[in-house]
Image (cartoon, rainbow, N blue to C red):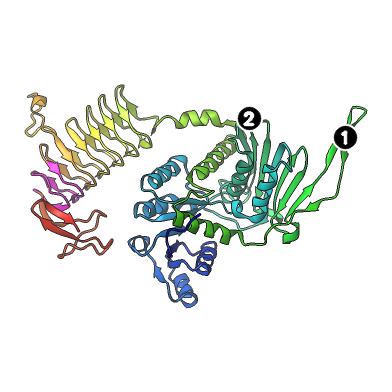
Amino acid sequence: MAETSEKTRIAVAGAGYWGMNLVRNYAELGVLTAVCDSNRQTLAALREKYPSITYYSNIQELLSDKEIDGVAIAAPAEMHFSLAREALLSGKDVFVEKPLALNLGDARELKDIAEKNSRVLMVGHLLQYHSAFIKLKELIKKGEIGRIHYIYSNRLSFGKIRREEDILWSFAPHDISMILSLAREEPECVMATGGNYLHKKIADVTTTHLEFPSGLKAHVFVSWLHPFKEQMLVVVGDRNMAVFRDTVPWGEKLLLYPHNISWQNGVPVPDKKDASRVEVEQSEPLKAECTHFIECMRARGTPVTDAREGIEVLRVLKASQDSLIDNGRKIYLKEERAKEETPFHAHESSFIDEGVSIGAGTKIWHFSHILKGSVIGKNCSIGQNVVVGPDAKMGDGCKIQNNVSVYKGVTLEDNVFCGPSMVFTNVFNPRANIPRMDEMRPTLVKTGATIGANATIVCGYTIGAYAFIGAGAVVTRGAPDHALMVGNPARQIGWMCECGNRLDSDLFCSHCSKRYELSAKGLKLL
């Protein structure tokens, strides 16, 4: 890849057991600019070793640093989505350790954000960058292995035992990533079995079986309750058998076994032959992975393990988990994909009328009702006991919390937040015994506005972009862009930044460093 920038500045978010390795490699590559971790003792230790870089204990402070071009995330798996999303939206390129996210909807959202904002998004499937695995792929491409019959992998050790994720999610992503890369097709079905020995809800040992349309079969055996460490990938073809073992000296990491089967009197007879060593370059896979991320950032290239590849691995992981929970039932991925094509998720207790439009990625939760004619955008979250419509309109990325009614005549633009139990009206002076829907007054809530819990918005007005309506406020005259409104009746007491923090008297945001000025048309971002 051609380099387009002389200087690339990368921060590492999460300096724990694995994050320390990222810190070391990016420092050795000369691009480490900052480290973020909530553990102050960890930061203090790093300051002694790397005194010239910046240290943060708050991720928002890191993301507001305009000197940082990319962020490498090595936080616990349950934080991957939220941290990667914030980093992408702040304009950073992102490397995130496996898995990309814990569910497919979140992973696809990250992919969409990266593509929309022209950001590099790379997943840490480390063994794709191991020189022995790269050499194995070359041998397969040249036909040295022949037609592949089956693949199996073992990733076994005694520890490190986790409690935030089971062995399947902790160990298997690497092997699934390698198998999919070699197979070059999606599995037809997945089946998984396992055992929970240390905790009744966390699997310590799993075996996952994959069947492919071409007839190829594969399985992945992972355990952190094994008497010794083993990391082995075996590829069996009709010409050669290859064994990649990552726990042996470099000269033995990749072996070829030219065994074959001869037929004598109709009986298959194995013809065993000595293994031959395949020469591979001695290099640290993590450094190669980090280097690849830097190259993709500089050349604006697509990583080998991009979001698409991460989603494919995640799809197999999810199917494996579903099978594991369902006593080893075969999960057919074609059927799962058909379910994914339903553009939104609605809880079984919710009710959706005919004649509504709901965008992809939207989630509708318990006991909510979407009435006829309503339009809801993509990636919205509709909480419990919410009523939308009829004929209400809602843009992308809106979050409606519990016990809210978005009535006819209300329009929410993108990324509007409605706190729990806040109220929209659509008739100015209602009476129970006098029908007045023909006197309905429309209400517009513009992009990025926040309405706090138990607030009331009287109809017929506009809530401006990025306005912030405090909890319990009663807005009787609308609100200008960026206004901070509190009280009953609501009055303006200040200005709010796009990021949701209050501006100081100089209209400066200390949180994200944005600065504004007042103009004839209202608040203006400088």
Q: Is residue 464 magenta?
A: yes
Does 92 sit above or below residue 456? below
**For residue 207, which quarter of the picture?**
top right
Q: Is residue 263 visible?
A: yes
Does 374 sit above or below residue 231? above
**For residue 371, which quarter of the picture?**
top left
Residue shown at 55% from the left, 32% from the top:
333
Q: Nearer the viewer, residue 242 or 313?
A: 242
Place of residue 164 in the rendered image (x, y in percent of width and height, measured from the top left): 51, 52
Q: Taking 493 as reference, is 227 left or right? A: right
Q: Amino acid at mark 1?
A: Ser
Give me the disc on residue 262: 1
Q: Taking 369 as reference, is 16 left or right? A: right
Q: Is residue 19 magenta?
A: no
Place of residue 204 in the rendered image (x, y in percent of width and height, measured from the top left): 62, 49
Q: Local crowd at mark 1 within 10 Å, few (<14), some, or many (≥20)? A: few
Q: Which mark is first along the chain, 1 or 2?
A: 2
Place of residue 411 in the rendered image (x, y in percent of width and height, measured from the top left): 20, 36
Q: Main secondary structure of the magenta part?
A: loop
Total number of numbered labels?
A: 2
In the structure shown, which secondary structural element does the residue marked by tag 2 occupy? loop
Give me the disc on residue 213: 2
In the structure shown, which secondary structural element does the residue marked by tag 1 occupy? strand
Highlighted range, magenta: 462-489
Place of residue 282 in the rendered image (x, y in percent of width and height, measured from the top left): 67, 62
